[in-house]
Image: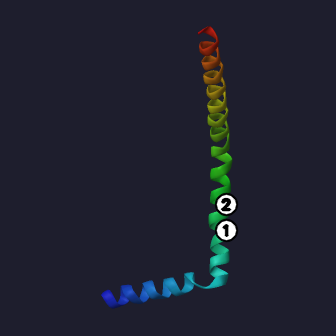
Amino acid sequence: MDKIANNIMDKFISKLNNEENKKKINEEILNPIFKEFSNKIYPYVSLIFLMYILNLILVIIILTLILKKK
């Protein structure tokens, strides 16, 4: 049973190492998944970045008000 499993794994690995198969996997599986993920996550990342910038601006304003008051 181990020989059969090892034989199947060796054939599978040799097929994956083929450049044509790597190209197919990359173009037909990985790229669409990455594009879909990035399209869905982009609004959240941009919102977090915007919130960070606003927070930084508020901290700077508060610090300047505190320093001017003293």
Question: Foreground: 67 or 14?
Answer: 67
- Image disc number at residue 68: none
Which of the 4 image quarters holds residue 28? bottom right
Which quarter of the image is occupied by the N terminus?
A: bottom left
Q: Which residue in the structure is indicated by mark 1?
A: 28
Which of the 4 image quarters holds residue 57? top right
Q: Residue at x 64, y 21 (%)?
A: 58
Q: Position of residue 14 (x, y in %)?
A: 53, 87
Instruction: State whether residue 1 appears in this view.
Output: no
Q: Which residue in the structure is indicated by mark 2?
A: 32
Q: Position of residue 55 (x, y in %)?
A: 61, 26
Residue 55 vertical position relative to residue 28 in the rendered view, above or below: above
Q: Label 1's element?
A: helix
Q: Residue at x 56, y 85 (%)?
A: 15
Q: Residue at x 43, y 84 (%)?
A: 9
Residue 20 vertical position relative to residue 37 in the rendered view, above or below: below
Count of number-bearing discs: 2
Residue 14 vertical position relative to residue 23 in the rendered view, above or below: below
Q: Marks 2 and 1, how far apart in space?
A: 7 Å
Residue at the extreme left of the image, as rendered: 1
- Callout 1 amino acid: Glu
Do the residues bearing badges 2 and 1 touch, measured as CB atoms within 8 Å? yes
Crowding around mark 2 (Cα neighbors within 10 Å: few <14, some 14 to 19, many 20+) is few
Crowding around mark 1 (Cα neighbors within 10 Å: few <14, some 14 to 19, many 20+) is few
Instruction: State whether residue 54 appears in this view.
Output: yes
- Callout 2 amino acid: Pro
Q: Label 2's element?
A: helix
Q: Position of residue 53 (x, y in %)?
A: 66, 31
